[in-house]
Image (cartoon, grey):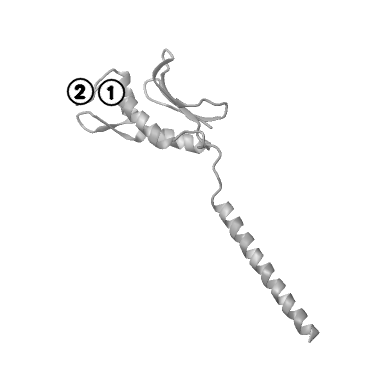
Amino acid sequence: MKNKFGQEEMVGFALILILVAIIILVFIGFSIRNPEKESVESYEVESFLHSTLQYTSECENNIEKLSIQKLIVLCNAKNKCLDERDSCDLLKIELENILNESWQIGEERPVKGYELTIRINENNQSLLEIKKGEITKSLKGSSQPLSKGMEIFFKAYY
């Protein structure tokens, strides 16, 4: 009779160990699935810049709606859109909307601030500059040359 009680206790102990192991595996699974993102990756900044330049704006010429890249060239030439809107004003509005939707900033978010600058390399003048949020020492940045000696720079601060 003594051996039978010992076997029952061993089976109970084994069931408790199995139950604890399953609970630990569940907790590990949840922690691996939802890692908190703490910083911005370089490829994100570069991809953002490339895709932003291809975004179709509201500005039209006689043939098509212009991409942001073509709108930058139009703004630099001081030309207007087909509907007589100022191309530089529309460029600023479009870029601010894209930035606000793509890079949500705040204390509780990984991104603390950003800066976008379009420069004319001939005389190192700024065609457009948009800054928002906190400028920190930690940043990821990218640049893209444009036509006619212009270049666009983007920095995300984290």
Name which residue type carries label 2: Glu
Q: Position of residue 50 (x, y in %)?
A: 41, 34
Q: Helix, strand or loop at disc 1?
A: helix
Residue drawn at point x = 69 percent, y = 68 percent: 17
| Left or right, residue 76 beside residue 40 | left
In which quadrant of the rendered view does residue 57 lie?
Answer: top left
Tally of numbered tags: 2
Q: Position of residue 142 (x, y in %)?
A: 48, 30
| Name of the residue lying farthest toward the right | 2
Instruction: Pick the residue in front: 6 or 142.
Output: 6
Instruction: Pick the residue in front: 6 or 147.
Output: 6
Name which residue type carries label 1: Ser
Residue drawn at point x = 67 percent, y = 72 percent: 15
Can you say whether 38 is above or below 72 in the image? below
Return the residue at label 2.
Answer: 84
In which quadrant of the rendered view does residue 64 lie?
Answer: top left
Residue drawn at point x = 26 percent, y = 20 percent: 79
Return the residue at label 1.
Answer: 87
Quote the CA–CA distance across marks 1 and 2. Answer: 9 Å
Q: Is residue 96 visible?
A: yes
Residue drawn at point x = 57 percent, y = 29 percent: 138
| Left or right, residue 140 beside residue 78 | right
Q: Looking at the rendering, in which quadrant would you find the N terminus?
A: bottom right
Residue 55's label in the rendered image is none
